[in-house]
Image (spheres, rainbow, N blue to C red):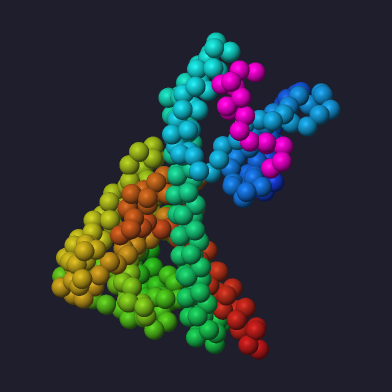
């Protein structure tokens, strides 16, 4: 052993107290890294290796004291480590490729995190909606039988319109004005119907108990949403959207940044009700259109209104049974 080699042998690694350790194993090779402490109480990192096919403890290894400038030491170690790796395996480790790979993994994790956040937000909104619906349902438990009859009549109207291809837009408008709960309990319980300007026609404008404004435009259930090739909306939908947008624009409520509008209405939801029993391609296309129309406007079908009304009836019935 040379004098230079002896100068590096400055601590007895066999007599260190290990605080924490972990081991790496591969075939006949093992490595062990430990957080350790000397007899004097100095902490540091101890790294040792051994051949697992030979029954002996790890060799002396190396000691990295806590007092060292770890950043400088690690830069020195990395530079020389790659030099030695290249000389042994004749193959460099492409740090740029590794870095790009890690950045791609980070970006993917960010996307997954954002999707999770949106999903949680969606579930929270659904929970809030359900809690509000249950709260309102308690106030109308004595009307459950009337609601059942009105919903049965509404379903019959819709199915007859589609079966006979008959336009019943006016009948639908009159019926829903008398049975607003079908559009949601928040449209009936402690809600009020509004009219900002008679010169701008809209089928229904409701202000809910919590101050949300819902503006409805009704089209007959037998009317189609998309043309046959699904590349464009029908004239009926185009007119309905135009009516909603003009009404919203006139009310000066189409912008979120105003604290209040000319008519005291802010950030409403415009709803176009049209269509029934869509095909799967039509449902997919409708979802895409609604993604672009949000958050101000939505196109909903009679199927979704009926399904929602049935759930509302179920909630009211359950509450009534609990009370009885």
Q: Nearer the viewer, residue 154 or 41?
A: 41
Residue at image position (74%, 31%) is 58
Question: At x 82% / y 24%, what residue is drawn?
Answer: 54
Q: Position of residue 43 (x, y in %)?
A: 59, 46
Residue 204 coordinates in the image, percent (x, y): 31, 71
The answer to whether one can see residue 173 in this image is yes
88 horizontally vs 80: left or right: right
Residue at the image point whose x is 42% and y is 76% from the top = 186
Q: Quadrant of residue 300?
A: bottom left
Residue 155 or residue 261, whichever sits in front: 261
Is 42 included in the stretch rendered in magenta?
Answer: no
Of residues 193 and 209, which is closer to you in this image?
Answer: 209
The N terminus is located in which quarter? top right
Does residue 229 sit above or below 171 in this rendering? above
Report the number of numbered marks: 0
Residue 281 visible in the current orientation: no
Measured along the vertical axis of the image, is residue 213 above or below residue 78? below
Quadrant where the image shows the C terminus = bottom right
Asked where in the image residue 62 lies, by quadrant, the reply is top right
Range of the magenta residues? 1-16
Classify 234 as above or below 49: below
Residue at 84%, 27% in the rendered image: 55
Q: Is residue 50 left or right of residue 315?
A: right
Give percent across and percent down for residue 284: 45, 45
Residue 5 x, y percent position in the rendering: 60, 22
Q: Residue furthest front?
A: 3
In the rendered structure, does residue 9 fall within the stretch colored magenta? yes
Q: Which residue, as the protein is rendered here, is positioned at the far right?
A: 55
Find residue 191 and report its image quarter: bottom left
């Amino acid at each position: 052993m040379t004098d230079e080699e002896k100068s590096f042998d400055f601590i007895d690694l066999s007599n260190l107290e290990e605080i924490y350790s972990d081991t790496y194993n591969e075939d006949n090779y093992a490595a062990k890294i430990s957080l350790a402490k000397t007899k004097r109480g100095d902490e540091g990192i101890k790294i040792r290796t051994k051949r697992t096919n030979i029954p002996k403890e790890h060799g002396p290894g190396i000691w990295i004291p806590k007092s060292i400038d770890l950043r400088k030491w690690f830069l020195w170690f990395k530079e020389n480590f790659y030099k030695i790796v290249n000389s042994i395996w004749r193959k460099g480790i492409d740090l740029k490729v590794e870095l790009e790979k890690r950045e791609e993994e980070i970006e993917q994790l960010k996307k997954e995190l954002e999707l999770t956040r949106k999903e949680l937000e969606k579930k929270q909104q659904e929970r809030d909606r359900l809690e509000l619906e249950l709260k309102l349902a308690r106030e109308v438990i004595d009307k459950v039988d009337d609601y059942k009859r009105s919903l049965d009549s509404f379903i019959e109207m819709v199915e007859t319109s589609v079966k006979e291809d008959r336009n019943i837009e006016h009948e639908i408008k009159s019926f829903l004005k008398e049975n607003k709960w079908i559009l949601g309990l928040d449209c009936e319980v402690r809600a009020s119907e509004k009219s900002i300007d008679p010169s701008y026609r809209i089928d229904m404008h409701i202000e809910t108990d919590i101050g949300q404004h819902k503006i409805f435009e009704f089209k007959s259930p037998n009317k189609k949403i998309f043309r046959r090739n699904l590349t464009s909306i029908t004239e009926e939908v185009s007119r309905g959207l135009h009516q909603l947008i003009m009404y919203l624009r006139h009310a000066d409520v189409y912008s979120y940044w105003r604290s209040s509008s000319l008519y005291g209405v802010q950030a409403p939801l415009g709803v176009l009700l049209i269509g029934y029993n869509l095909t799967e391609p039509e449902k997919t296309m409708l979802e895409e259109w609604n993604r672009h129309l949000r958050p101000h406007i939505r196109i909903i079908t009679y199927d979704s209104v009926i399904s929602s009304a049935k759930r509302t009836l179920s909630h009211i019935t359950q509450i009534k049974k609990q009370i009885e």
